[in-house]
């Protein structure tokens, strides 16, 4: 049986889908709509920005675009923390998205550090 191919872009698309699902479940209140809009923007931005990174014009451009992905994920983490703190959704809905956010942040931090090391070598 062949090893499963790891595709970060697919994972980011799946993450964006989770964010969409979560934001659709938020209450239709003034706060719920605001949080949903902000989280929807930041949580769905990492995937297309990663696509931009794949077409980077230089190593420096690649690192910069990965940094944008990381910024969007960090913003999403904060919006998720606010949603959790306000208990707008059950923890069982928010926790998986929060966990995936943390994992993706770690992946991007490591990728950026590696890309910077590789850039310094050349």
Image (tube, grey):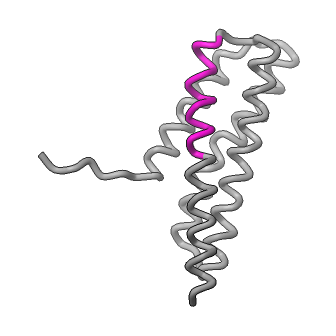
Question: As drawn, which residue projects farthest toward the right?
Answer: 30
The answer to which quarter of the image holds residue 83 is: top right
Q: Total number of numbered labels?
A: 0
43 or 60, which is in the foreground? Answer: 60
- Looking at the image, residue 59 sits to the left or right of residue 28; the answer is left
Residue 23 lies left or right of residue 38; in this view the side is: left
Q: Please report the residue visible at 64 percent of the width from the left and 70 percent of the height from the top.
A: 63
Q: Where does residue 104 sit, x and y in percent of width and height? A: 57, 45
Residue 68 sits in which quadrant?
A: bottom right
Of the pair 76 and 105, the residue shown nearer to us: 105
Q: Residue furthest bottom?
A: 122
**Where's the N terminus, which quadrant?**
top left
On screen, residue 103 versus residue 9, left or right, reads right
> Where 91 sits versus 101, above or below?
above
Residue 17: give x, y in percent of width and height. 53, 33
Asked whether residue 96 is drawn in magenta, I would say yes
Residue depicted at x 50% and y 43%: 13
Magenta segment boundaries in residue numbering? 91-104
Residue ID at (58%, 74%)? 56
- Residue 23 sits above or below residue 66 on the image: above
The one of 28 and 44 positioned closer to us in this rendering: 44
Residue that extends furthest to the left in the rendered view of this protein? 1
Q: Does residue 69 lie above or below 115 as drawn?
A: above
Q: Position of residue 20 (x, y in %)?
A: 60, 29
In which quarter of the view is residue 58 placed? bottom right
Question: What percent of the width, then of the height, locates residue 42?
Answer: 71, 42
Instruction: Name the image quarter holding the C terminus.
Output: bottom right
Q: Main secondary structure of the magenta part?
A: helix
User: Which residue lies at the image location 53% right of the left edge and 72% below the top edge?
Assistant: 55
**Residue 66 to residue 94: above or below:** below
């Amino acid at each position: 049986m062949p090893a499963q191919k790891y595709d970060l872009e697919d994972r980011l698309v799946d993450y964006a889908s989770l964010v969409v699902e979560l934001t659709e479940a938020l209450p239709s209140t003034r706060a719920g709509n605001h949080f949903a809009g902000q989280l929807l923007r930041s949580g769905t931005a990492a995937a297309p920005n990663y696509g931009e990174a794949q077409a980077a014009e230089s190593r420096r451009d690649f690192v910069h675009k990965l940094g944008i992905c990381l910024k969007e994920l960090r913003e999403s983490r904060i919006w998720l923390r606010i949603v959790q703190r306000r208990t707008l959704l059950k923890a069982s809905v928010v926790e998986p998205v929060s966990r995936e956010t943390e994992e993706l942040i770690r992946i991007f931090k490591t990728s950026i550090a590696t890309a910077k090391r590789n850039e310094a070598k050349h």
